Image: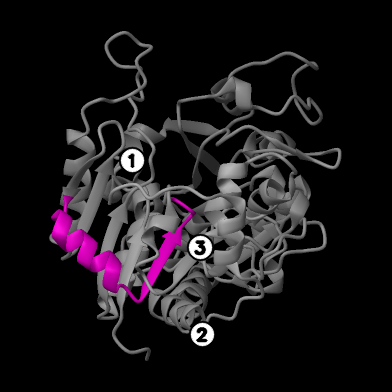
Amino acid sequence: MTERLRIIVTGLIAQHPALGGVAWDYLQYALGLHRLRHDVYYVEDSGEWPYNVDGGATGQDWVARDCTPNVQHLAETMARFGMADRWAYRFPIDARWFGLSDAKRAEVIGTADLLINVSGSLEHPDEYRGAARLVYIDSDPVFTQIKLALPDEHLDFKRRVAAHDVHFSFGEQLSALVPDTPYSWLPTRQPIVRSEWTTGEQPRPAYTTIMSWTSYKPLCYRGQRYGQKDVELQRFVELPRGRPDVTFEVALNPTQHAQWESDDDSGRPDPPGLRVSALDRLQRAGWHVVDAREHCSDLDGYRAYIQTSKGECSVAKNGYVKGRPAWFSCRSACYLAAGRPVVVEDTGFGAVIPTGLGVLAFSSIEQAAAAIDDVEANYARHAAAARDLAATYFDSDRVLTDLIERAMAGNQATNSRLQASELHAKGPRSL
């Protein structure tokens, strides 16, 4: 067991009060470390303005100029898990801080042993150099490395990455298909606080997933386009037609960003160039589609949706499939912890997590159908294996203890501080 440390965790819990899965992604870092008895603080300083998902009163006012709901959501979340006095949030529109007092926040930053910047969510990590060691968690492998490799693009992103001492990635085995970067990416994975996911309830007969059609626009690198789930789901959209006795359900984010969709029509059931809504495409093929905001918008709703599912059936982002970084979904890990088998598209994760029992990987619609048949025929074995895999590979005690030990060892091939100073010399912003 690592000695008790003062640790700052960053994230986007306040930024997305209506996305329960996002809250769990960051919360499980802070909560897991708290339960390991470290001195943990959560700081949200992303520089991202809160937004109105419905466009506000005019339908076009996307900036939320009142952060009260965001702050309330964060305060209630932290209080619920015993960290009521251990959070800070900066509202970027007028630079106001909430939570910790200015003096306490400065003291925490100046004495922290470790800052864990989850998903690179911190806007100015260089301003947190009071912490002894800054750790970057890449939760979006392939896309992260492409941004770093593109010349004269994503310069602010590059500065942010370079400000850290140690770099970890959910891409546990970055393949030769992933661009080289100046960093030595250490493998890690999402920590799951398993006690929060255990359930004895019987599931309903539905294989589900929770997703957005797209998360951001595709990236292009050396003539290849690296897209989102919209590309991959086209390849598997007909899966329910061949299994009419099985319920396939998607909790879909209703916001569809057409400008982010891939312009590659290959694999579409529609004539080339014809765009229909994601909802229509899925429903026509036999998927049951529900509104993710209604079913998964808070911590409890998101968890209940997973716990009441028979299992997960999901594709991955096209970039993960092309780059094969051995990425495994945070969401899928939560299904496992709930004892729900997952049937998910292959990204190379079989190199780091056993597959075939509890976790079944597919690369074709035939393989996906066969995997569902296997789970249906041997459900109890797959469910038990799912729980075992969560305990062995995703348990927060194991994942976070390993992360801290390697982060404090500082095994990094490059001098990130030097790179940061070379990339950009910027004056400090008041903390």
Q: How crowded is mark 1: few (under 14 residues within 10 Å), some or many (20 or more)?
A: many
Does residue 273 sit above or below 41 in this rendering? above
The three-letter code of the residue at mark 2 reads: Ala
Q: Name the residue under label 3.
A: 136
| Closer to the camera in the image, 23 or 422 | 422
Secondary structure beneath dot 3 equals strand
Q: Name the residue under label 2.
A: 409
Q: Can residue 212 be seen by looking at this rendering?
A: yes
Secondary structure beneath dot 1 equals loop
Q: Which mark is first along the chain, 1 or 2?
A: 1
Per the rendering, the mark at residue 196 is: none
| Closer to the camera in the image, 260 or 292 | 260
Q: Magenta span has 116?
A: yes
The three-letter code of the residue at mark 1 reads: Gln
Q: What stretch is highlighted in magenta?
A: 99-121
Q: Name the residue under label 1.
A: 15
The three-letter code of the residue at mark 3 reads: Tyr
Q: Magenta span has 16?
A: no
